[in-house]
Image (spheres, rainbow, N blue to C red):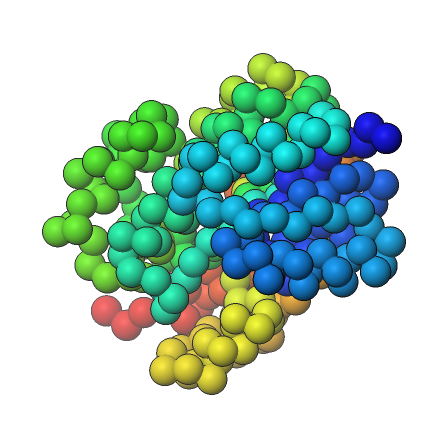
Amino acid sequence: MIKEVVLVTGAGQLSMAIARRVGFGKKIILGDKKKDHADAIAKIMNDAGFDVVPMEMDLSSRGSILTLIAEGQKYGEIKMLVNGAGVSPSQASIEAILKVDLYGTAVLLEEVGKVITEGGTGVTISSQSGWRMPALTAEQDEQLATTPTEELLSLPMLQPENIRDTLHAYQMAKRCNEKRVMAESVKWGDRGARINDIAPGIIVTPLAIDEFNGPRGDFYKNMFAKCPAGRPGTADEVANVAELLMGPAGAFITGSTILVDGGATASYYYGPLKPEQ
């Protein structure tokens, strides 16, 4: 039976929450670098009536991304993309963050944009961290948005001597995600498709709970305590936004980034989270 296909990367709570909102009645191809993670999420969803095929996929590899797309095309046209894959500043090195979160996401948006069907939609998950660094120049923003993917990691601003630490690498990657979505939305539009970005704040997931109990735990707890919402968010609240962006109610939204952070970024610039000078 030919079905519309949803490509999902990253077998985590955010990816699953979004896939459950938009993936019913469709074939879901779920890729994760750790196959056992993909298997576990696929079992939960298949037991709930979804149709999920788990597979191993490395976001930092163009070949692996193409394999994911080819698997999806076995079942029908690629209708949706949910990109929840990535690594965090506490998980990986500067080089790994740039290779996975920055380069890998750019390649994924590029390759899916070549095959997305008319009326197709996609969301990629970046982070509020992309908003926590000084503004780049217009030239730097354009470089992040439009540099050919295989040349991205050669940009001067992304060289090791210009990256302070893993958090700075993560911020640069997420800024690039947002700029890349803007540029790719023009190309997706030529195919009658849309692509947007969601920038979450502190969302409760197993990874976040590890962070709460880790060396930076007090930092994260202070962040959600002093944001206007006064609490962390849930994966389902991110899925609410994804459902809007990927459905007919969001038909006039493309190339956008939506902050879903409980107001933490607003508080960082204009409230109690503002860094002391």
Taking 232 as reference, is 217 above or below it? below
- Closer-to-camera residue (194/228): 194
Q: Position of residue 166 (x, y in %)?
A: 29, 61
Q: Quadrant of residue 190?
A: top right
Q: In percent of the image, x 40 and y 44: which residue is there?
A: 60
Residue at x 34% of width, y 46% of height? 99
Q: Is residue 111 left or right of residue 37?
A: left
Seen at 69% across and 51% down, the residue is 18
Q: Is residue 150 above or below residue 134?
A: above
Which image quadrant: the N terminus?
Answer: top right
Q: Is residue 82 left or right of residue 140?
A: right
Which is nearer the eye, 17 or 29?
29
Where is residue 35? Give x, y as percent: 57, 57
Counting labels gives 0
Going by the image, does 37 lie left or right of 75?
A: left
Q: Position of residue 13 (x, y in %)?
A: 64, 62
Direction left: furthest residue: 161
Image quadrant assignment for residue 203:
bottom right
Residue 55 seen in this snapshot: yes
Residue at 66% across, 34% down: 72
Which quadrant is home to the C terminus?
Answer: bottom left
Return the x and y of residue 61 as percentages of the image width and height: 41, 40
Please indicate, yes or no, whether residue 120 appears anywhere in the rendered image. Answer: no
Please determine whether, in this image, residue 271 is positioned above or below residue 21.
below
